[in-house]
Image (cartoon, grey):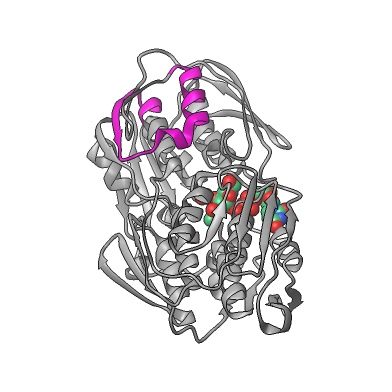
């Protein structure tokens, strides 16, 4: 397994470009299963999860051509398998996103039920209840979800009230409803920019989706979907992570190819703690840190509030802020795994259930660390950038799942970071070892 070696203490300076959003690319790739015609996606990030999703689509029978590194032409004209097996689902939970499209277009799907993972139990019960509301028969058998449309035919539109806001749940059901008979209304739908991006793609394919980006989405089913070209939105979490990197190193970064409107709550919070963020143009931010940081509390919540996917990075930043910050995690029940690693570097953090109190500023010292999930890894990298001495982060396959070449991007702006390749197999897709937590 690869590691990162970081020697902290350098202020970052220069320009960094943001990649396409992984969490938008994954559902958009799954959406290609809804059509027999080619769907072309541009600006896909070059990260492990996209490679895994591609493999899943190919296993199902789709052909995926890559005329350029970040462009996939996906043709699902000859789907032969209607199943996402355990080996893949346990490597990447987002593989459950094929359930909605397969069920909707072919009237059947079998997907291994993802277990708990490093950040929480993460059931998919809300997806399944919604499919039942659309007329599907859903059974659990041998650890798999087996879903069938009524009489093996079409789903039927209906009214769905999500008990809790769920991002992939909203995406899965929105995709399923595009080919259902009649109208589907999703209430308490997720409002994340990734939902809007997916809806845009679906509409380009000929779907009739209205209201995406609000908590009420209406989908009028159509007979079939066609081809489309779509460019994936910039990754708002990668953007936020680089803002945190500029701030924690007291650096000065120009962050380009981003969409600041998608992370308004993050920008607002960073400004409150003393980070200077200037919008040079609609897709470029200039971030610097002219004064001392002041600790501020934060609560993670669904969009448009502060995202859970920025909580770990914010915690790293708060170790360098004056005062005490209380961080409340309301989305996932076990998303403070990075705290104990940060403590080993000297951070003063106490955890009480869903609250973490960080008291700063604390000088951090480099240490050997273990990454536990994607965003936790990012927070350890941030801490390593400001720590005195050398930090070695193990299991960086987590970060490779969602950050495109993070070490190269950081090195380009002055960080002292390198990848230590452990073995030849390091470059092959990661296979979880027995006893290791399943993936996020
Ligand atoms: N939940 C249920 N039942 C369900 C679905 C969700 O109880 O059927 C609960 C979850 O356990 C969690 C909460 O609802 O407590 C929200 O979960 P959600 O379904 O919104 O999460 P997700 O769709 O599985 C996506 C992102 C995550 C991100 C969350 C929250 C993708 C592929 N993943 O997960 O991204 O943290 O939304 O914004 O879009 C990451 O990129 O590092 C990552 C974990």
Q: Is residue 108 left or right of residue 404?
A: right
**Observer-nearest residue: 66 or 107?**
107
| Rendered view: 139 above or below 298 | below
Q: From the image, which quarter does the N terminus lie in? A: bottom left
Residue located 23% across and 40% down the image: 412
Residue 393: x and y, percent? 43, 47
Residue located 48% across and 30% down the image: 264
Residue 154: x and y, percent? 65, 76
The reply to whether the magenta stretch includes residue 251 is yes
Residue 370: x and y, percent? 50, 49
Q: Which residues are magenta?
A: 246-274
Residue located 49% across and 24% down the image: 268
Does the rendering let one see residue 119? no
Q: Is residue 392 left or right of residue 170?
A: left
Quadrant in the picture for residue 385 = top left
Residue 104: x and y, percent? 60, 73
Q: From the image, which quarter does the C terminus lie in? A: bottom right
């Amino acid at each position: 397994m690869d590691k990162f070696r970081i020697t902290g203490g350098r202020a970052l300076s220069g320009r960094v470009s943001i990649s396409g959003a992984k969490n938008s690319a994954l559902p958009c790739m799954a959406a290609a299963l809804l059509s027999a015609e080619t769907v072309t996606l541009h600006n896909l990030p070059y990260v492990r999860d996209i490679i895994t999703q591609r493999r899943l689509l190919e296993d199902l029978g789709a052909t995926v051509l890559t005329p350029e590194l970040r462009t996939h032409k996906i043709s699902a004209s000859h789907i032969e398998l209607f199943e996402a097996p355990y080996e893949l689902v346990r490597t990447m939970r987002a593989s459950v996103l094929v359930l909605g499209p397969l069920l909707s277009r072919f009237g059947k799907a079998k997907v291994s039920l993802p277990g708990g993972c490093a950040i929480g139990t993460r059931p998919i019960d809300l997806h399944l209840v919604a499919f039942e509301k659309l007329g599907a028969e859903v059974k659990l058998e041998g650890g798999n979800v087996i879903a069938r449309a009524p009489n093996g035919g079409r789903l039927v539109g209906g009214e769905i009230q999500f008990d809790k806001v769920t991002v992939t749940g909203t995406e899965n059901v929105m995709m399923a409803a595009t080919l259902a008979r009649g109208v589907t209304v999703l209430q308490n739908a997720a409002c994340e920019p990734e939902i809007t991006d997916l809806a845009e793609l679906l509409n380009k394919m000929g779907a009739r989706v209205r209201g995406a980006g609000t908590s009420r989405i209406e989908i009028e089913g159509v007979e079939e979907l066609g081809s489309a070209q779509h460019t994936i939105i910039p990754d708002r979490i990668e953007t936020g992570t680089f803002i945190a990197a500029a701030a924690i190193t007291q650096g000065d970064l120009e962050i380009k190819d981003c969409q600041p409107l998608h992370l308004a709550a993050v920008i607002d919070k960073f400004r409150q703690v003393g980070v200077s963020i200037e919008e040079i143009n609609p897709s470029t931010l200039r971030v610097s840190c002219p004064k001392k940081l002041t600790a501020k509390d934060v609560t993670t919540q669904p969009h448009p509030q502060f995202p859970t996917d920025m909580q770990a990075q914010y915690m790293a930043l708060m170790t360098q802020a004056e005062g005490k910050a209380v961080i409340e995690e309301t989305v996932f029940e076990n998303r403070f795994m990075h705290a104990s690693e940060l403590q080993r570097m000297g951070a003063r953090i106490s955890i009480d259930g869903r609250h973490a109190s960080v008291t700063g500023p604390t000088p951090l010292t480099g240490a050997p660390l273990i990454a536990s999930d994607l965003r936790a890894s990012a927070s350890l990298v941030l801490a390593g950038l400001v720590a005195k001495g050398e930090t070695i982060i193990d299991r960086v396959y987590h970060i490779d799942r969602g950050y495109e070449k993070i070490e190269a991007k950081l090195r380009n702006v002055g960080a002292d970071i390198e990848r230590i390749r452990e073995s030849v197999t390091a470059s092959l897709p990661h296979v979880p070892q027995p006893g290791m937590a399943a993936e996020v």
